[in-house]
Image: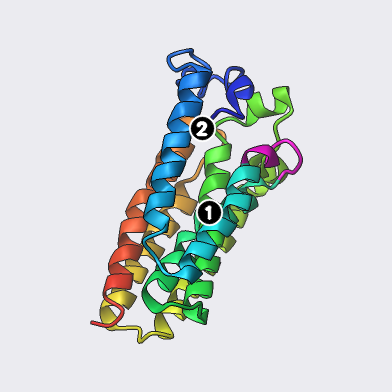
Amino acid sequence: DIVDRDLDSQVARTALRPIPSAAVTLRQAWTFLIFQLLLGLFVLLQFNFVTIGLGIASLALVATYPFMKRITYWPQAWLGLTFNWGALMGWTAVIGSLDWPAAILYMAGFFWTLGYDTIYAHQDKEDDALIGVKSSALALGAQTTPFVIVMYTVTLVLLGWASSMVNLSWGAGLFLFFAAVHFTWQAATLDTTDAANCSKRFKSNRDVGLLIVFALICVNL
């Protein structure tokens, strides 16, 4: 938000965010950020060395992500790499080393993010085009729905693959089936010309996330 404050002030949906609306000063924002970083460091240092190393490595992705929309039409891909890092850290925090199930789960999250964040980007595509911000929504245009279908399909395949590597149960399969139904609803009813429609389908991925969590919990049951 600090990096994007000037851009956010030019986009109708984001103009009322705390910094561009002046509800929070830049100094206050930096103070809060530093507090969050110190708190995060305290939490990170409670884990093993592999997890600590991964946490530090994630800072490169986190720090560069806000600038991606200025240089590529695929900032959603960078977000996917950044936002799903917890799949790797969660595994190493418990196991102590990286393994294929964690890597495949990470890839599943990457493709899922590409799908839902492209839907999200369609809310701002007119303003983005005017101010020179790039996104996958602008790159794909009318091809967004087929793209989302492919991304969600790959996500489900990878989730099933990761689960099967640690003993996929019928319960996990059932919840992944429900996730597939939800993904199908999103793609079948998506209208990229309607910002409200895109917002609803983007936010509904919280429900998909819950279904995936339940699937992962049920893997060994």
Give the left or right position of residue 17, taking residue 204 as reference.
Answer: right
Q: Residue at x 55, y 57 (%)?
A: 56
Position in image of residue 210 (x %, y %): 31, 58
Q: Label 2 amino acid? A: Asp
Element type at mark 1? helix
Residue under the image location 47 percent in, 52 percent down: 188
Residue at image coords 33%, 77%: 173
For residue 147, what is the image quadrant?
bottom right
SS for dot 2: loop
Magenta segment range?
Answer: 66-73
Q: Nearer the viewer, mark 2 or mark 1?
A: 1
Q: Which residue is mark 1?
A: 113
Between 97 and 198, the one nearer to me in the picture: 97
| Kind of residue at badge 1 | Thr
- Which residue occupies 73% across, 35% down? 70
Determine which residue is flagged by label 2: 194
Q: Can the viewer see residue 126? A: yes
Asked whether residue 19 is in view, the answer is no
Q: Earlier in the sequence, mark 2 or mark 1?
A: 1
Residue 54: where, in percent of width, then height? 53, 63
Residue 207: mark in rendering: none
Q: Nearer the viewer, residue 92 or 43?
A: 43
- Name the foreground residue: 62 vs 102: 62
Q: Main secondary structure of the magenta part?
A: loop
Magenta stretch encompasses residue 155: no
Left or right of residue 171: residue 177: right
Q: Which corner quadrant holds the N terminus? A: top right
Left or right: residue 215 versus residue 7 is left
Q: Looking at the image, is 112 positioned above or below residue 172?
A: above
Across and down, in percent, residue 206 comes to 36, 50
